[in-house]
């Protein structure tokens, strides 16, 4: 009979910063991190205290990229089940090494700890900077990053065997730098409500579609928005606003967000697809949005992170209806900690006519 793995005790091979810990030891460590540690260590200490307390549930904070961040209550066992699913997919085994370089306030870093705790990984933590691999003294089997960290770590990626990257979309330009990398690099798809990722895409092998992890099934509603069934994590169906193209029963291509689709003259346009087309023409960060128009209902605009306007910016590569009718410039695009663009907050910085 197979024994169910739970959240109550760490795997016997679990190490943190080279030291074996049981829950008693983790309790003392958490107190020390909170009283003496750097900012990221303080956050880790608080999470450890929450993880080893008697409650079967834990509070998680969403990123807030589509509005105000919110707190949701998640079962610790669901987090354990997610960790096991990830471990099985990436063939992680007790004694494998893991590097945590993300803020422990958010689900991605929390799940790195949970994977180590449950799977018996040996985890080290570094300050979640934009260049987390720069001063590494050793190599690791597994690491999670956001795209900005990945972009700034190209020359150091050989230190990591497998990298998962999430929190924001990986740009076409960054993907081109990762093809045939010695590391296996996967873009992830998921959300706090699904306890981190439920699907991955091997971008180091130029894959276009996300593949769902074991025990996850998917489909689309009448809007072509993805729904997710992950009974090992949550008993209810999760309906998203992510428009996708199903390429098989277990794979999909991400198109964009339903709540950002622009209806211009009856033509429905996904801004994320236009952004993908324009990535090679605009060096700075930018995003596509819309503003109201008496004739077309909505017209397309573009917001660019640049202080000096372009003199000759052309959108002739796009179909006429899809070309931005106005260009706005901002000194800095608003973003989440993971680098995901906060569209509405940034739009509030510009004056729309």
Image: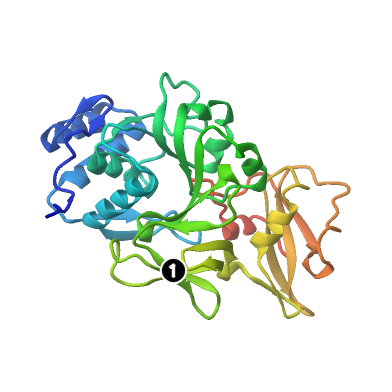
Q: Quadrant of residue 71?
A: bottom left
Going 80% across and 63% down the picture, which residue do you hit?
323
Q: Quick check: can you spot residue 338?
A: yes
Q: Position of residue 139 (x, y in %)?
A: 42, 25
In this image, 269 relative to 124: left or right?
right
Q: Position of residue 26 (x, y in %)?
A: 17, 34
Going 66% across and 47% down the picture, which residue do you hit?
172
Q: Position of residue 240 (x, y in %)?
A: 46, 69
Answer above or below: position of 289 versus 306. Answer: below
Given residues 101 and 291, the one toward you in this image is 101
Give the crowd class for mark 1: few <14, some 14-19, many >=20 residues within 10 Å: many
In this image, 56 relative to 157: left or right?
left
Q: Quick check: can you spot residue 353?
A: no
Answer above or below: position of 277 versus 227. Answer: above
In this image, 230 relative to 65: left or right?
left
Given residues 24 and 136, the one toward you in this image is 136
Going 56% across and 57% down the picture, which residue do you hit?
209
| Residue reaching furthest to the top | 137
- Which residue in the structure is indicated by mark 1? 218
């Amino acid at each position: 009979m197979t024994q169910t793995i739970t959240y109550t005790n760490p795997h016997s091979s679990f190490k943190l910063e080279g030291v074996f810990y049981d829950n008693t030891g983790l309790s003392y460590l958490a107190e020390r991190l909170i009283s003496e540690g750097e900012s990221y260590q303080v956050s880790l200490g608080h999470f450890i205290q929450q993880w080893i307390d008697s409650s079967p549930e834990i509070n998680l904070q969403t990123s807030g990229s589509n509005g105000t961040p919110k707190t949701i209550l998640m079962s610790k066992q669901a987090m354990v089940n997610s960790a096991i699913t990830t471990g099985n997919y990436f063939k992680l085994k007790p004694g494998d090494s893991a590097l945590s370089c993300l803020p422990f306030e958010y689900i991605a870093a929390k799940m790195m700890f949970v994977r180590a705790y449950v799977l018996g990984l040996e985890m080290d933590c570094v300050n979640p900077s934009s260049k987390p691999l720069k001063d590494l003294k050793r190599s690791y089997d597994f690491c999670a990053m956001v795209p900005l960290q990945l972009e700034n770590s190209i020359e150091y990626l050989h230190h990591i065997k497998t990298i998962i990257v999430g929190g924001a979309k990986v740009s076409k330009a960054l993907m081109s730098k990762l093809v045939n990398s010695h590391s296996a690099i996967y873009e992830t798809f998921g959300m706090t409500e699904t306890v981190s990722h439920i699907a991955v895409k091997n971008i180091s092998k130029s894959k276009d579609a996300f593949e769902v992890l074991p025990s996850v099934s998917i489909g689309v509603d009448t809007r072509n928005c993805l729904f997710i069934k992950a009974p090992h994590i949550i008993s209810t169906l999760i309906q998203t606003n992510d428009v996708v193209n199903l390429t098989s029963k277990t794979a999909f291509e991400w198109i964009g967000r339903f709540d950002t689709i622009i209806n211009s003259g009856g033509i429905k346009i996904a801004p994320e697809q236009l952004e993908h087309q324009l990535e090679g023409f605009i060096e700075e960060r930018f995003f596509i949005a819309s503003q109201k128009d008496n004739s077309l209902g909505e017209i397309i605009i573009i917001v660019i992170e640049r202080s000096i306007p372009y003199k000759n910016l052309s959108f002739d590569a796009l179909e006429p209806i899809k070309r931005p009718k106005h260009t706005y410039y901002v000194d800095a695009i608003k973003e989440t900690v993971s680098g995901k663009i906060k569209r509405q907050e940034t739009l509030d910085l510009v004056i729309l006519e």
